[in-house]
Image: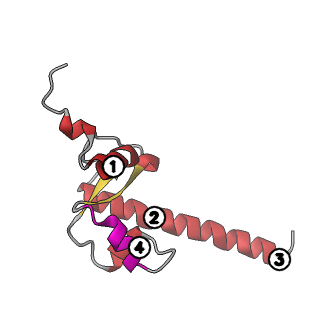
Amino acid sequence: MTNKTMANNTENEWQKTYWAKIRLECLIHYSGGIPKCVCCGEAEIKFLGIDHINNDGAKHRKQLSRGSRITYWLKRQGYPKGYQVMCHNCNLAKGFYGICPHKKHKNIVR
């Protein structure tokens, strides 16, 4: 392994650690403490992401520079309102159906 390859590997590991730290800070902020899905309560960090409460995520992604990370943008903006933590399943369902089935069926007795 060359010195350049070793340096690139070290830089890549540093970047991964840095982005993981920023992402965790963002999830903690928007969860108000322990990161968890606002809909179903899922707490596995790998399953969590940031949701645009007003369903304007596609529009917002077009405004951000290509490859920009939403968590870094949110931190730079001082964690503005209008975002919440959701697991990827609930977020995807909200996008497809307008409401997550957890919320839709919340009042049904099983």
Q: Residue at x 15, y 21 (%)?
A: 109
Q: Residue at 36% across / 67% down in the picture?
A: 58
Q: Which mark is residue 105?
A: none
Q: Secondary structure at mark 3?
A: helix
Q: Which residue is mark 2?
A: 21
In the image, the segment drawn in magenta is 55-64
Mark 2 in CB contact with mark 1 (< 8 angstroms): no
Nearer the N terminus, badge 2 or badge 4? 2
Which of the 4 quarters of the picture holds residue 77?
A: bottom left
Q: Nearer the viewer, residue 23 or 49?
A: 49
User: What amino acid type should be assigned to the residue bearing mark 3?
Assistant: Asn
Q: Position of residue 3 (x, y in %)?
A: 83, 76
Spatial CA distance of label 4 from label 1 is 26 Å
Is the C-beta separation of discs 4 and 1 under 8 Å? no
Mark sitting earlier along the chain (1/3): 3
Residue 3 disc label: 3
- SS for dot 1: helix
Nearer the camera: disc 4 or disc 3: 4
Gap in angstroms between the C-alphas marked 1 and 3 = 48 Å
Whole-angstrom CA distance, mark 2 to mark 4, is: 10 Å
